[in-house]
Amino acid sequence: MNDDPELIAEQREAALQTARGQSKTMPWEQQGSLDLHETAEQAKKVEQRRVEAAQSDSEWTTRAEQGLVEVDEHGVPLGSVRRAVDLQAADEYDELSKEAIAIINKYFAHQDCSEIHMNAPDQIFAKYGGERVKVNCSFGSESEYNRFIEDLVNQADTHLTWDDIKQEARGVVRMSGGDRMMIMCPPLTKSVAVAIHKVVARNWELQNLIDNGTMNSNMANLLVASVKAHANILVVGEMGSGKSVTLSLLAQYIGANERIALIEEVPEIFIDLPDITAMTYYPASSDGGGKLGLPEVLDTALYGRYDRILIGEIHDKGMYRMLRVMATGGDGSMSTFHAGDAKSALEQVRNHVLLEYPQLPPATVTHFVRSAINIVVVIENIDGKHRVKQIAEVEWRNLSEDNVQIGLNELFAWDHKGERTINGQPGFISIGRPDDNGKLREKAERYGVPLSPEWFPSDNMLLT
């Protein structure tokens, strides 16, 4: 049998047509180079699998495509939408790739789509309405697929280039519309793999988190008061739990006359304030080359006379400097961090400092952590929803400087079993209120911010 790829493609197509009863006479049939009966039987099986797959997807396709945004032949949305994956498919893409880009745009531009995953030219998925589904499209070739991803990187708001990402075999960038794109390349993967997370909350307010069941109104009132009282807040949780969104929405309550420094490795936090400077730092794992890491950027920012400093996703180096900012004049600073609960978050913060400065006594670092961070907000994905799992105040006055314990005054929590809610159903519960062992009440009095007793029910129970 001839191994020519084009001839094989023709043979497969003709066999499919035969299986459908639409056979055409092709030149290779006369050469006797193919067992048409055998190939047709194989094609019938392939076609049957495709029919079964199409039938299983039909309900989804009908439901989803009713709300998808219409695009033109270049993939440009025809309606008024916020953005799509790629606003203009270049004319040099082949027809199959143009079609793939258009279909991807239809999904991504829709308000109910939150993620796009691309594992290979023909393995494209969307998270739409909370469901993960396969997008029925494919690029014309691996090179076309790679070119599309390169175009996205070239349009991105990032210090990384496509060559940088290929050299490191990975990268995370902020797309032109503000969305986050993670890329992994061979040899880490067989094909270039991409995960795009769309910022769906750019036009949200804190009320949206209440409506979504992420928190209740009493919790929101406390957090807003904490921001206005210049409390130092650490927002923690697992990946994709909504830390950046929560911090972004809380930052809306920073005074319009304050000067803000926003420092991130990958820009994700969105803040609409008049006097804000966005800065980018390079991860500690980079090879240097004169690029500034978080410690250097933070040190430089201290000369900018900022009222507050917000830091997105502290990974390793820079933790000590963040605490120093919070403890020495940077009241009202906020940051995000990966952790499962408030206590482990503070312990990890302390351990990061000790790894960076092993000569410091653990008790001294512990006291430093207690005095710098005032409020810890923990968010978790629970039953398919983002929930504020815990809000806790950090205690520090009742512990001596040589004590290595980290005390917490838990204020609110999510009772997932409903054991302490009034109706016995899962819900938010009020556990305590700010006390003299923390700094929130003192700061609230200093800045004239009321902490209403009504936010903390006396019976320690609260319905959602």
Image (cartoon, rainbow, N blue to C red):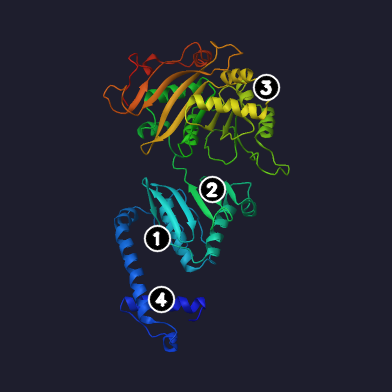
Residue 29 in the image: above or below residue 428: below
The image's mark for residue 136 is 1
Callout 3–callout 2 Cβ contact below 8 Å? no
Name the residue tied to disc 2.
182
Q: Which numbered disc, 3 or 1, marks the residue closer to the eye?
A: 3
Mark with earlier residue (3, 2): 2
Name the residue tied to disc 3.
360
Neighbor class of circle 3 (other Cα within 10 Å; few <14, some 14-19, many 20+) is few
Neighbor class of circle 1 (other Cα within 10 Å; few <14, some 14-19, many 20+) is some
How many numbered marks appear? 4
Q: Which numbered disc, 4 or 3, marks the residue closer to the eye?
A: 3
Name the residue tied to disc 4.
13
- Under tag 3, what secondary structure? loop
- Under tag 4, what secondary structure? helix
Q: CA distance from mark 3 to mark 1?
A: 57 Å
Residue 33 in the image: above or below residue 354: below
Q: Residue at x 65, y 39 (%)?
A: 284
Residue type at mark 2: give it: Met
Q: Nearer the viewer, residue 220 or 13?
A: 13
Residue type at mark 3: give it: Leu
Q: CA distance from mark 4 to mark 1?
A: 19 Å
- Under tag 2, what secondary structure? strand
Q: Quadrant of residue 458?
A: top left
Mark with earlier residue (1, 2): 1
Q: CA distance from mark 1 to mark 2?
A: 22 Å
Callout 4–callout 2 Cβ contact below 8 Å? no
